[in-house]
Amino acid sequence: MREAWSRGYVKVCGVTSVENALAVVASGVDAIGVNLATSPRRVTPERAKLIREATEGSVLCCGVFAENEDEEISTYVRALRFDMVQLHGALGSALYDDLRRCNVRIIKAISIESEEFARFDDDLVDAVLVDGPRPGSGAEHSWDALATRAFRKPVIAAGGLTPQNVAQVIAATQVWGVDCASGVESQLGVKDPQLVEAFVTSARAAWHAGEE
């Protein structure tokens, strides 16, 4: 069994029900994302708890936050026992310290066209998720900036990824992991297990080819 937190990491974000989460897990992903930020895929804390409990031990579970108050994030992390948090927005020192006390991995999401992309100190976190100019839109974007921006921590590619283009993105960027939401959906918030499986297979094949 492969280590979930390792190169070749695949996360599907924005799962919205227990049934769909279990189907996604069965498709071979390393992690799922539960959105507690303002988003069309946002779930209630009660729904997030059910998803977490149903998948615990079989996949890494990530709480996704954007523009949430620090206290709210800390409360959810403790109550829902996430393995990871994905933060879209500021990472203040108090929140950082509290998340470290909670013993969760911290993934910092950064838009590839933002000022933050050039100046963020990734030593603070466990991984950097590089998203498009409009995070959460699912729109494809250029990855050219990654050619000149060196990160020390693992880089996860996001934004417009699908089973059809994920291998090309991995080959072009040599990223450590990939993350998608809309690219594997049959409708908003509903993941298609066949698309998820195709995404995982294509991504893992690309990493394998790069190692040969």
Image (cartoon, rainbow, N blue to C red):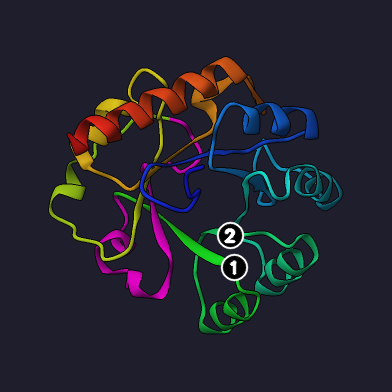
In the rendered image, the vertical position of residue 119 relative to residue 45, given as above or below: below
Farthest residue to the left: give it.
148
Q: Nearer the viewer, residue 133 or 105?
A: 105
Magenta stretch?
113-138
* Helix, strand or loop under label 2: strand
Mark 2–mark 1 CB contact (< 8 Å): yes
Number of numbered discs visible in the structure rendering: 2
Measured as percent of width and height from the top left, residue 96 is found at 54, 78
Residue 207 figure quarter: top left
Which numbered tag is attached to residue 104?
Answer: 1
Instruction: Evaluate whether residue 169 shows in this view.
Output: no
Q: Nearer the viewer, residue 183 or 49?
A: 49
Spatial CA distance of label 2 from label 1 is 5 Å
Q: Nearer the viewer, residue 131 or 50?
A: 50
Q: Earlier in the sequence, mark 2 or mark 1?
A: 2
Image position of 57 (left or right of 143): right
Residue at 34% of width from left, 74% of height from top?
Answer: 123
Instruction: Evaluate whether residue 176 shows in this view.
Output: yes
Asked if residue 158 is among those painted magenta in the image, a careful observer would answer no
Measured as percent of width and height from the top left, residue 159 is found at 41, 36
Q: Identify the residue under disc 2.
A: 84
